[in-house]
Amino acid sequence: MGILEWLRSRSSQAAKCIMVAGGAVILFGFMFYTDEVHMSQTPFRLGSYVPDDDAESNMVSPRQDQSRRKALLEEYCQKNSSSDMSPRMMGNFFVSDRYKVLYCKVARTGSTTTSALLYNLEFGTNFTQQEYLEQQGGTPILKRLTSYTKDEQMLRLNTYKKLVVVRNPLERLVSAYLFFFGGKDYFVGKTRHVLYNQHYQDMLETIDWKIPHTEDYGVIQTTNEKYHVIPFLAFIRAVTEDTDRWENEHWALMSNYCSPCQVHFDFIAHTETLAKDLNIFFRNAGVTGRENVFPPVKTRLGKRKMLDLYRQIPIKDIQRIGGKYAPDFDMFGYSLEETILQLLST
């Protein structure tokens, strides 16, 4: 099945978008396998987060936007059975007693930006992201919900304002891959790149990669051994496999983090509009006079990099992403087909 036929079979809305985007653009976007990723590096400080322009959310009020996001989550939860909140989930919630806020931290959704902001608000500091990370071994620290007694936990769950940040699953996978594996053109020998590529060498099995093999995707030479940089296709096939072997919190289902069907979240922020969402949430939580620690709203520049990676991925593997991460797409209002069409139209 080709790209056009697949998108038409998925939804009438997607079919209409195809007419707008143009068949030639779509075919070009996915039929070329060999394009490489070119990822520039820029210093990251708290206050420099760059969210996507969100034309749809700009047309509605913040209250309407939140009502829509929460309604989608509630609709999903009503249709799908769910279990009680486990003690392990409690450990994902961070507490601000000063502003009576609970933040459920989900990896690769702007979690460090959000955590650093919460820390600055809680303790009256003005740390950059890097400074925040460097002082994590010291005190004070943000408390986890598990550090309280059961009665104290329930009190906070019932009375504090609860925040979760989610992200388009397709973009989140790209973020995880580039941050931890690097890819051929983004690999710069950082410790995490070396460690993750070494640890997950068996992901190469998913593309029938026989070692020794071509060095087209780059290699890591250590004192005693040579490792291959994991290609994005191998990463995608591994993370969508129904196995525990390649599970990791940084690409685990977002819906597995925060018990979203058991916890009534007061605010669902999107990474794509993170700066705006955090400003609205904390302003409603009573934060005033701390504008200097909030990230400014800017235009994001990541869609081309996403397209460069996803054009390497066959349709059957795109479908596997849609299947594995279906709860995240459905719970949080993202669309696999519409995201692909948006990428191809850039």
Image (cartoon, grey):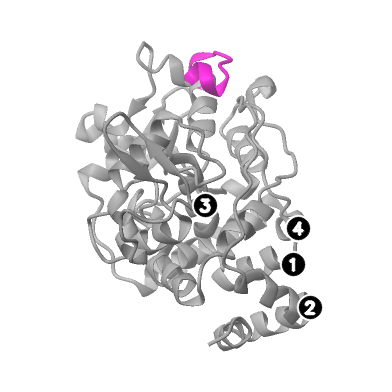
Name the mark nearer the viewer: 4 or 1: 1
Say what amino acid the circle numbered 4 marks.
Ala
Q: Tell which of 63 and 303 is nearer to you.
A: 303
Q: Is residue 266 visible?
A: no
| Label 3: which secondary element | helix
Residue 98 image point, x, y percent: 46, 22
Gap between marks 3 and 4 measured at Cα:
22 Å
Q: Which residue is mark 2?
A: 20
Q: Which residue is mark 4?
A: 55
Residue at the location (55% across, 41% down)?
Answer: 186
Q: Is residue 13 magenta?
A: no
Q: Amino acid at mark 1?
A: Ser
Residue in view at x 62 percent, y 68 percent: 340
Quadrant assignment, res 222: top left
Of mark 3 and mark 4, the one earlier in the sequence is 4
According to the picture, the residue beneath numbered tag 3 turns out to be: 174
The residue tagged with tag 2: helix, strand or loop? helix
Task: Decide: is 92 above or below 1.
Answer: above
Q: Residue at x 49, y 42 (%)?
A: 182
Question: Between marks 3 and 1, how big is the CA–CA gap?
Answer: 18 Å
Distance between the alpha carbons at the discs numbered 3 and 2: 26 Å
Marks 4 and 1, how far apart at CA? 15 Å
Q: Is residue 148 above or below residue 93?
A: above
Q: Name the one closer to the observer, 42 or 19.
A: 42
Q: Nearer the viewer, mark 3 or mark 4?
A: 3
- Closer to the observer: label 2 or label 4? 2
Depth order, front residue of 210/322: 210
Name which residue type carries label 3: Val
Task: Left or right? Give the position of 319 relative to 22.
Answer: left
Q: Which residue is mark 1?
A: 345
